[in-house]
Amino acid sequence: MAVTNQPGRYMASDFQTGLCDCCEDCGICCYGMCCFPCLTCTIANDLGECCLCGLTMAARSVYRTRYNINGSLCSDYLVHSFCQMCAACQLKRDINLRKAQGIF
């Protein structure tokens, strides 16, 4: 059986919005469509990473592990490779929701 989440202080869960739930926050979707590098830089800053490194599969994996979100390196790779825009928007929506909930 494959390990799909890591032990941590958060209960295992999924991202708070789906991969294609752009209508949950149209502002983030428009931000990503108009200036994708700006969105990835904003996410990198939120995660305390260097903006020049860009948004990689590793950033999604680290975030997922930090908040005990279900998934695997394989799923992170596939989502990042084939749906990079949607993955970035999903990650930013989740960050904003966690900030609003006081758990970021």
Image: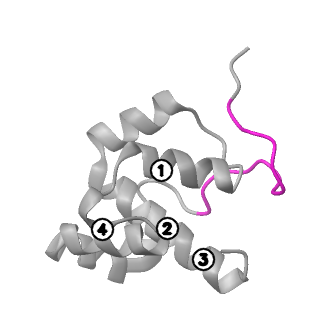
Q: Viewer-proximal residue, 89 or 22?
A: 89
Q: Which mark is residue 51?
A: 4
Tell me the tag on residue 60: 1
Residue 14 sits inside the magenta stretch: yes
Sequence-wise first label, 2 or 1? 2
- Give the distance between the C-alpha atoms of the residues marked 4 and 2, in whole angstroms: 10 Å
| Residue furthest top in the image | 1
Magenta segment range? 4-16
Residue 50 - label: none
Quadrant position of the C terminus in the picture: bottom right
The residue indicated by pointer 3 is 97
Residue occupying the point 77% across, 47% down: 12
Query: Residues under labels 3 and 4: Cα distance?
Result: 21 Å
Q: CA distance from mark 1 to mark 4?
A: 14 Å
Left or right of 63 on screen, residue 20: left
Q: Quadrant of residue 53?
A: bottom left
Amino acid carrying mark 3 in the image: Leu
Residue for point 25% across, 77% down: 30
